[in-house]
Image: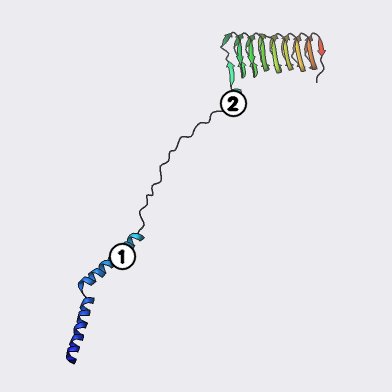
């Protein structure tokens, strides 16, 4: 009986050992371990990212329209020029400075300053006038100044704030500010002014009247 009990004990140990080392149990354990490891790798592996930057619509820079101030500045920088070989019949009116080296048969109006070396037969209205080596018949009215250079012969009346003469003028001079008659000046006409300067050599044939200045 003792022998039978011993054999049964050995038999139970053999069965228990076989159940632990059976190929089925090893396969299932190995398979479950690999599946777990695979899930861990998939979870830890970062998903690829699209590094391409999003497209942007880039528009060309727009040209800012010029303001009225810029346009007025450009206009002031411009200058009208009548060249020496030009002859104009009719009135001339500009909003800029102007140079007249040719001939104008008509009135001239300029909102800027005038430089005249040519001939004008008509009335002149301007901001300021400089007459150089010119012979003309014209009444000249300027808001600021009239400057008659040497070798000029002007037939007409002159009116401005300040008048300077170093040539010949046949007409009346009216200056609210100052009249300067230089060495080579000759005036055949009346003078009306706030102040008068007469240099040696100047010739005057006319009346002189002084008006009070502010």
Residue at coordinates 19% horizontally, 85% vertically from top-left? Answer: 8
> The C terminus lies in which quarter of the figure?
top right
Residue 103: image quadrant is top right
Residue 152: image quadrant is top right
Residue 141: image quadrant is top right
Could you tell me which secondary element the residue under label 1 belongs to?
helix
Residue at coordinates 28% horizontally, 66% vertically from top-left? Answer: 34
- CA–CA distance between discs 2 and 1? 78 Å
Residue 164, image x and y in percent?
73, 17
Relative horizontal placement of residue 135, taking residue 87 as reference (left or right): right
> The N terminus lies in which quarter of the figure?
bottom left
Residues packed near mark 1 inside 10 Å, few (<14), some (14 to 19) or many (20 plus): few
Q: Nearer the viewer, residue 53 or 179?
A: 53
Residue 149, image x and y in percent?
69, 16
Front position among marks 2 and 1 = 1
**Residue 204: in sight, yes or no?**
yes
Location of mark 1 (residue): 36
Where 81 falls versus 5 (above or below)? above
Q: How is the image coloured?
A: rainbow
Residue 168, image x and y in percent?
72, 11
Relative horizontal placement of residue 10, taking residue 179 as reference (left or right): left
Residue at coordinates 22% horizontally, 76% vertically from top-left? Answer: 19
Q: Nearer the viewer, residue 37 or 176?
A: 37
Tags 2 and 1 touching, CB below 8 Å: no
Which label number is shown at residue 199? none
Could you tell me which secondary element the residue under label 2 belongs to?
helix
**Residue 178: in sight, yes or no?**
no
Q: Residue furthest bottom?
A: 2
Residue 26, image x and y in percent?
23, 72
Location of mark 2 (residue): 68
Give the tally of numbered discs. Answer: 2
């Amino acid at each position: 009986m003792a022998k039978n009990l011993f054999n049964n004990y050995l038999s139970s140990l053999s069965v228990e050992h076989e159940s632990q080392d059976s190929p089925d149990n090893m396969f299932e354990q190995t398979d479950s371990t690999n599946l777990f490891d695979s899930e861990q790798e998939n979870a830890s592996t970062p998903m690829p990212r699209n590094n391409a930057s999003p497209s942007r619509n880039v528009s060309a820079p727009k040209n800012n329209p010029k303001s009225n101030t810029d346009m007025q500045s450009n206009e002031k920088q411009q200058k009208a020029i009548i060249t020496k070989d030009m002859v104009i019949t009719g009135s001339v009116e500009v909003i800029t400075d102007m140079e007249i080296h040719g001939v104008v048969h008509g009135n001239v109006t300029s909102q800027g300053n005038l430089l005249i070396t040519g001939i004008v037969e008509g009335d002149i209205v301007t901001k300021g006038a400089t007459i150089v080596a010119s012979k003309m018949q014209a009444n000249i009215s300027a808001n600021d100044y009239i400057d008659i250079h040497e070798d000029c012969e002007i037939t007409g009346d002159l009116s401005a704030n300040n008048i300077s003469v170093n040539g010949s003028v046949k007409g009346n001079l009216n200056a609210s500010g100052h009249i300067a008659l230089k060495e080579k000046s000759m005036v055949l006409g009346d003078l009306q002014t706030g102040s008068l300067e007469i240099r040696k050599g100047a010739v005057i044939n006319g009346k002189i009247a002084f008006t009070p200045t502010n």
